[in-house]
Image (cartoon, rainbow, N blue to C red):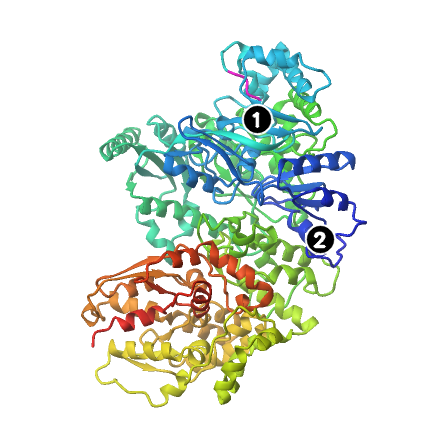
């Protein structure tokens, strides 16, 4: 059981801290508090080990200092980038060194010579965005491209979808500037045999000389050569990462006379930071692929057919061949969103190969696709071979595979799709036999798993469902790893194809490579790192795979909650849905909304993964009777702005906003509700009281004294109360009910009702002009202000009242329509999880017919119930910023469709994530600067660049307020834009 001290990363390090001296020497950051150590105790693997400290260096000299400190203090250095490793490569008990925040610069670039020099923290997708205008790319492209770093790719020898033609990171690493375990600096690059011999004759006191001599002695020895060639994976296996790549170095000129230059960089690739710490990497670049791409989606009646079909497809030299089995495809059948992505599927195939070709011309593409279909039919393999073309359609095919895997990864309970045997690789011609034997092993233990991924190179990802909280399954975890290792060895394959050895496969390296070869690579590690400073316990002398697992064995404690978490099998398991994949660590340059606070800061504790890791740690290992009673959790979750992006963009659909609200409910029950939180939560009631003296209220809330008193930023303007509330205006509305098409119920949300009643009036007049009867029914506020401040039990009562009042009225024919996304979408998002007993079914029925006004109007237009003739024909350019919860729970597509009902209105959606205001977050003094920083990433610059004649529009009230405060531009709700476009 871990012992927790109530300290956070905000705590000032004391002079008595063992790492105080290191902190004084570094330009970068040093943390020893529990929060940061917990955040870096895990990666995307099944492992957890608390480090002594976390460092974020800003320079090569910082890294040199860290290594020296580790050597002097008998500890270790664990290099880390995005932390997406699946085999525990970046967890350890020493100093975790995160290079992703600061060491992420592109240093030099030569388009003509096709190379680029980067620091190890440069993100792959950002690098390729930089290179694309020059027609170039870095070839290996992992599925984690939008957050992984080049340093991590080199450490792992990463491959990707197109490894068949692009190879791995090892094939494109030209030079590596490295700091060694003794603090010396060596640049590794290609060299002639003569140069290699000269270096072997250097000063024997130098580590560099000892490194080259060790290689010369090892690889020149005939017996060693024989053993390496006999025991290492078959060279035909393109994806091979077991141990150190001495088999690759062996096949170079100094040892074979084949003219191939020796480049020790090939040894560094896949070494997982155990040999050296890279500070600069020079990469080979390749041209972008040809323009015309297509996927031949070959349907097969069995997996065995697909294995044979792969060999036929390879003869046509495709760029990639991916496998998807029927389990994945069937997972998408009942998903409304994914049905449209099944357009290319005919019947019920047992397996599918997605075979990609990229050609210079479309006729060439059609020709190769037709030839491949003939090949399949002649071999009597498969039954349907559609060619999918066009970027959008190809994207749908890949989305289908991803969605199926997402469903599988979100199975409720403690059995998880587990990384243990998922990375094996054999030569494609042996794949059918290997898979037959593989299925027998799993069948023996009553296990099965989906089959998917990189069949072209003989690697199929295989993840059985195991419960690593169950002692029997932990034992089985080890057993099947061992038995599959025997099987892979039988076919001369690699136990690791692209995910690395790390903690997960290191135990089996002596068996996979043979004891003779293991002693060779062990001596190599001792030569490079005699004091075992660099990432110990990986590849060499690895502990058993069942040590330091992330989950504790046994039943977790039960936690009573206000929200219903039964779909995830409880609050803890909702937290544990985060598998550490780090999709939340992408930057604003890449796009998307998740996670805005990480995008603005690049701090792990401001990512969804970081928050989930901290919650899991305290919920499972806290010694307190109430595991929510930890200030550390409060401090980290305080900066979650509840944008809901993780609910939709996270592959595991982790809903951190919901988890945060639940936590705050429990935390406040122990510590009391802060005054400001209570004031914001009770805003609807305070508005009603303030309306009695409206002029005084508006004056007072705008004063500096008032802002200081409640903890708001002085720079921030405060929304004013409207002259009349929307409900007051509605008491005697003008009626246009004769001949109306249908009735709609308008939800008079607390923000529109009190602060922007003119917007509500325009919405009503617009709907009436379009022929609809509009009724504001009796209802409470939405409860959004209470949810945002964690007063879930109060929100629960409000939700129950609204469900009871509105359920009898609302149906498909008489929908509930809302103006403010955060309010109306509460009916769809939170209400079903707040309702209990008989109310739950009513809540779900109500949710199905609760629509944003944008959705309602766009739907009616598509049905032909609204005519363009009602609107102006003049031209307008519109820039749209979508609301975060709209993007997560609904879509911005209906808003764009609605805004383009006037025939000459054209909408461009700003590629922004969250605006940064996030309800009250951006008003709060301590959050103001972060709020502005988020706005300045994409949104504010895009608004400033818009022409004066362009309309800026945003459905969210806080978004409009933030944009106006940040840029001075007037921002309209989409309803206002459409209302002003009406004729007459």
Relative to 215, residue 904 above or below: below
**Left or right: 611, with 351 as reference point:** right
Secondary structure type for disc 1: helix
**Camera-nearest residue between 542 and 785:** 785
Question: Is residue 836 at least partly visible in the picture?
Answer: no
Front-most of residues 369 and 743: 743
**Local secondary structure at mark 2:** helix
Location of mark 2 (residue) = 34
**Mark 2 vs mark 1: which is more N-terminal?**
2
Secondary structure predominantly adopted by residues drawn in magenta: loop
The answer to which quarter of the image holds residue 229 is top right
696, above or below 434, in the image: below
742 with respect to 964 (left or right) = left
**Residue bounds of the magenta highlight:** 261-266
- Indicate which label's residue lies in the foreground, 2 or 1: 2
Asked whether, in this view, residue 625 is left or right of residue 681, the answer is right
Give coordinates of residue 507: x percent, y percent. Answer: 66, 32
């Amino acid at each position: 059981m871990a012992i927790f001290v109530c300290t956070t990363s905000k705590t000032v390090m004391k002079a008595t801290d063992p790492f105080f001296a290191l902190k004084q020497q570094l330009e970068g950051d040093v943390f020893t508090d529990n929060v940061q150590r917990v955040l870096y105790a895990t990666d995307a693997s099944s492992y957890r080990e608390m480090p002594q400290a976390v460092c974020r260096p800003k320079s090569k000299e910082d890294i040199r200092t860290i290594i020296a400190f580790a050597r002097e203090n008998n500890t270790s250095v664990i290099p880390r980038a995005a932390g997406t490793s699946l085999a525990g490569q970046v967890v350890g008990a020493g100093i975790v060194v995160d290079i992703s925040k600061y060491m992420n610069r592109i240093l030099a670039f030569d388009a003509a010579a096709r190379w680029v020099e980067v620091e190890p923290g440069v993100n792959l997708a950002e690098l390729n965005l930089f290179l694309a205008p020059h027609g170039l790319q870095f070839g290996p492209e992992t599925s984690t491209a939008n957050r992984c770093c080049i340093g991590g790719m080199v450490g792992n020898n990463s491959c990707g979808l197109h490894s068949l033609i692009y190879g791995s990171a090892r094939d494109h690493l030209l030079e590596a500037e490295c700091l060694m375990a003794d603090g010396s600096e060596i640049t590794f690059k290609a060299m002639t045999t003569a140069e290699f011999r000269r270096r072997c004759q250097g000063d024997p006191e130098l580590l560099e000389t000892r490194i080259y001599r060790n290689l010369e002695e090892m690889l020149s020895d005939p017996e060693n050569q024989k053993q390496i060639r006999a025991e290492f994976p078959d060279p035909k296996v393109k994806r091979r990462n077991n141990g150190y790549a001495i088999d690759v170095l062996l096949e170079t000129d100094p040892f074979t006379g084949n003219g191939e230059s020796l480049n020790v960089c090939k040894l560094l690739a896949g070494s997982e930071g155990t040999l050296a710490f890279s500070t600069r990497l020079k990469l080979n670049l390749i041209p972008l692929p040809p323009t015309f791409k297509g996927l031949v989606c070959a349907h097969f009646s069995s997996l065995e057919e697909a294995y044979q079909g792969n060999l036929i497809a390879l003869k046509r030299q495709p760029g990639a061949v991916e496998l998807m089995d029927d389990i994945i495809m069937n997972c998408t059948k009942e998903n409304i969103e994914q049905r449209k992505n099944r357009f290319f599927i005919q019947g019920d195939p047992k397996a599918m190969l997605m075979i990609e070709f990229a050609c210079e011309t479309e006729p060439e593409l059609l020709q190769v696709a037709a030839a491949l279909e003939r090949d399949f039919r002649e071999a009597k393999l498969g039954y349907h071979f559609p060619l999918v073309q066009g970027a959008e359609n190809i994207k749908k095919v890949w989305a289908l595979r991803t969605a199926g895997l997402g469903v599988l990864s979100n199975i409720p309970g403690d059995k998880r799709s587990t990384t243990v045997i998922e990375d094996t690789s054999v030569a494609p011609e042996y794949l059918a036999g290997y898979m037959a034997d593989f299925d027998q092993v799993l069948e023996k233990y009553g296990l099965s798993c989906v089959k998917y991924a990189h069949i072209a190179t003989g690697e199929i990802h295989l993840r059985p469902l195991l419960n690593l909280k169950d002692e029997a399954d932990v034992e089985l975890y080890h057993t099947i790893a061992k038995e599959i290792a025997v099987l892979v060895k039988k076919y001369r394959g690699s136990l690791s194809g692209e995910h690395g050895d790390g903690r997960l496969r290191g135990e089996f390296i002596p068996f996979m490579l043979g004891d003779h070869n293991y002693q060779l690579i062990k001596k190599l590690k001792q030569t490079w790192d005699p004091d075992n400073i660099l990432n110990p316990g990986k590849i060499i002398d690895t502990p058993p795979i069942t040590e330091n697992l992330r989950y504790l064995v046994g039943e977790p404690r039960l936690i009573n909650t206000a929200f219903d978490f039964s779909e995830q099998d409880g609050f803890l398991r909702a937290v544990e849905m985060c598998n550490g994949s780090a999709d939340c660590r992408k930057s604003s340059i890449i796009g998307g909304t998740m996670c805005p606070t990480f995008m603005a800061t690049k701090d792990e504790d401001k990512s969804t993964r970081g928050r989930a890791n901290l919650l899991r740690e305290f919920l499972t290992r806290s010694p307190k009777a109430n595991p929510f009673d930890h200030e550390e959790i409060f401090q980290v979750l305080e900066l979650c702005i509840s944008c809901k992006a993780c609910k939709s963009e996270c592959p595991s659909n982790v809903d951190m906003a919901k988890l945060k609200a639940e936590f705050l409910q429990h935390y406040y029950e122990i510590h009391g509700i802060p005054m400001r939180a209570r004031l914001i939560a009770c805003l609807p009631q305070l508005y009603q009281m303030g309306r009695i003296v409206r002029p005084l209220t508006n004056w007072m809330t705008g004063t500096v004294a008032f802002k200081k008193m409640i903890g708001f930023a002085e720079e921030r303007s405060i929304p004013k109360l409207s002259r009349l509330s929307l409900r007051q205006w509605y008491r005697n509305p003008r009626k246009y009910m004769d001949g109306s098409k249908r009735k709609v119920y308008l939800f008079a949300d607390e923000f529109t009702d009190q602060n922007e009643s003119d917007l509500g009036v325009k919405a009503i007049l617009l709907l009436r002009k379009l022929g609809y009867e509009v009724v504001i029914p009796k209802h409470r506020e939405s409860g959004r202000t209470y949810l945002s401040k964690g007063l879930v039990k109060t929100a629960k009562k409000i939700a129950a009242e609204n469900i009871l009042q509105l359920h009898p009225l609302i149906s498909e024919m008489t929908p509930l329509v809302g103006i403010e996304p955060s309010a109306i979408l509460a009916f769809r998002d939170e209400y079903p999880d707040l309702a209990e007993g008989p109310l739950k079914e009513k809540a779900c029925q109500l949710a199905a017919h609760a629509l944003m006004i944008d959705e309602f109007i766009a739907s009616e237009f598509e049905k032909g119930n609204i005519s363009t003739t009602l609107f102006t024909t003049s031209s307008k350019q519109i820039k749209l910023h979508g609301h975060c919860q709209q993007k997560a729970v609904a879509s911005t597509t209906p808003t764009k469709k609605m805004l383009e009902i006037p025939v000459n209105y054209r909408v461009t959606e700003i590629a922004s994530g969250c605006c940064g205001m996030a309800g009250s977050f951006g008003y709060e003094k301590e959050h103001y600067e972060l709020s502005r920083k988020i706005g300045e990433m994409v949104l504010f610059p895009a608004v400033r660049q818009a022409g004066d004649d362009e309309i800026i529009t945003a459905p969210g009230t806080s978004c409009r307020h933030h944009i106006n405060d940040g840029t001075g531009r007037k921002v309209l709700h989409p309803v206002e834009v459409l209302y002003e476009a009406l004729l007459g």
